[in-house]
Amino acid sequence: MSDEDLMEHFQAGVVEAYNILWERWTGPLVNFLYRFTGDKKACEDLIQETFLRVYRNRHSYKRIARFSTWLYTIAGNLAKTEYRKRSRRRMDSIQSFNRDGEEFEMPLPDETFAPDKHAESAIQDQHIQNGLLALPDHFREVVILRDIQQLSYEEIAVITGLPMGTVKSRINRGRTKLQELLQDIYPFLENEEEDEDDFDVFFSELA
């Protein structure tokens, strides 16, 4: 049964349809939200909040839009809000340190979420994750949606509320910045002739 059919059933009061959507989409959303925030705990909280909003706002969903597009719009907005909050908290901590000259605890990356650090794929994963987190959030969002979540340009335009030309421009600029960040680690990314198939292969392990 399609996501859209399940939503219609859920709107009609069939709670089991909601449970199926939860099971179907938790994995992809975990990947998207972790890639955006880099924080496992925040990711878990955002998953809960995303599906809570799906539950509460189920009657606002219209079948003219794909369910996945509606879901990623909710999750993306929550992720951006959370990322901004965390960025402000880090800046407040740094400013407090500069004013008072006192030590403060810097947040450390979550070491429990990644697989074996000695595995080549895990190392690549961490390098790419660090590169993604170094991108401005408006570039990071569209690169993740396109190259990791494998969404179409049309879907990304709907999710972000941006014109198609802006979506394509941000994806290209985000990829270029990511290339610059990772080229010392992955020299093949220095190739100026960007090929989307190359990105598909490069990100395939993260999807």
Image: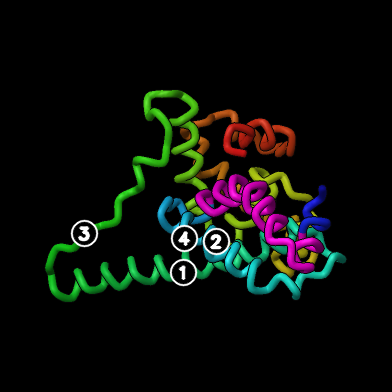
* Picture coordinates of residue 143, whole percent (x, y): 64, 50
The answer to whether marks 1 and 2 mark residues whose Cβ atoms lie closer than 8 Å is: yes
**Residue identified by numbered label 1:** 84
Asked if one can make out residue 22 in the rendered structure from this viewpoint, the answer is yes
* Picture coordinates of residue 11, whole percent (x, y): 76, 68
**Residue identified by numbered label 4:** 45
Q: Which stretch did the figure color magenta?
A: 7-35
Disc 4 vs disc 2: which is toward the camera? 4
The answer to whether marks 3 and 2 mark residues whose Cβ atoms lie closer than 8 Å is: no
- In this rendering, would 180 be left or right of 191? left
User: Neighbour class for label 2 at 10 Å: few (<14), some, many (≥20)?
Assistant: some
Q: CA distance from mark 3 to mark 2?
A: 24 Å
- Going by the numbered disc 3, the residue's amino acid type is Glu
Q: Residue at x 26, y 67 (%)?
A: 94
Front residue of 135 and 42:
42
Disc 4 vs disc 3: which is toward the camera? 4
User: Neighbour class for label 3 at 10 Å: few (<14), some, many (≥20)?
Assistant: few
**Residue identified by numbered label 3:** 105
Q: Residue at x 82, y 64 (%)?
A: 65
Marking on residue 137: 2
- Going by the numbered disc 4, the residue's amino acid type is Asp
Q: Residue at x 52, y 31 (%)?
A: 186
Q: Is residue 168 above or below residue 199?
A: below
Marking on residue 49: none
Q: Is residue 119 above or below residue 124?
A: above
First-in-chain label (1 vs 3): 1
First-in-chain label (4 vs 3): 4
Disc 3 vs disc 2: which is toward the camera? 3
First-in-chain label (4 vs 1): 4
